[in-house]
Amino acid sequence: MKALLIAALFAVAGLAHAELTCYNLNDNTNIATWTVGQPRDAFDNLDGDENLTCFAQGKELAYIQQHFSGLRMRTLPSVRDVQYPQRSPTYVYWDGDDALFIVENL
C-alpha cells in the first residue's frame, strides 16, 4: 500500500528533474524540495510531527550518499522518464528518522 502511495506521489510531483523532495504522509503534502547548492532553509518549518518520506535522484542522491552513511535507503521501481524515454531513472527514498536526519543535516 505504501509503495502504491509513493508511486502516486511521483506521478503527481512529476519528478523529472533531480532534487530531494520531502512529503508529509500524514496529510499527503509536499513539505519542500532541495537541490545541491541551495540553502536548506526550505525545511526550517518542520515541527517534528511530520511523517516524512524523502525522495532523491541525480546530484542530490549522490550528495546524500557521499555525506551521510548508515541510512536505510529504499529504491522504487524505475519510473519511465517522459522527457528521456531511453533512460529510466532510479529513485531512492527514505522515511521516518532517516528522512528527518537528512533534512536536519543538509
Image (cartoon, helix red, strand yellow):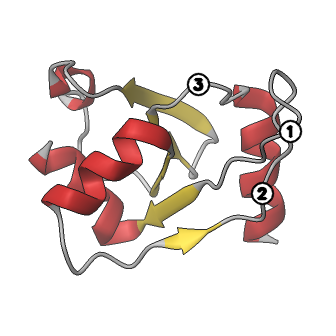
Q: Secondary structure at mark 2?
A: loop
Identify the image quadrant of residue 43: top left
Q: Nearer the viewer, residue 38 or 30?
A: 38
On residue 78, the disc is 2
Mark 3 neighbour density, 10 Å: few (under 14) some (14–19) many (20 or more): few
Point out residue 89 in the picture as x, y percentages from the top left corner. Answer: 68, 47
Q: Nearer the viewer, residue 8 or 29?
A: 8
- Looking at the image, residue 96 sits to the left or right of residue 42; the answer is right
Q: What is the number of callouts on the image?
A: 3
Q: Earlier in the sequence, mark 1 or mark 2?
A: 2
Residue marked by disc 1? 86
Marks 2/3: CA–CA distance:
14 Å
Identify the image quadrant of residue 69: bottom left
Q: Nearer the viewer, residue 47 or 21?
A: 21
Marks 1/3: CA–CA distance:
15 Å
Residue marked by disc 3? 17
Kind of residue indicated by mark 2: Ser
Kind of residue indicated by mark 1: Gln
Q: Identify the residue at image location x=21%, y=18%.
A: 38
On residue 74, the disc is none
**Badges 1 and 3: C-beta atoms under 8 Å apart?**
no
Q: Secondary structure at mark 3?
A: loop
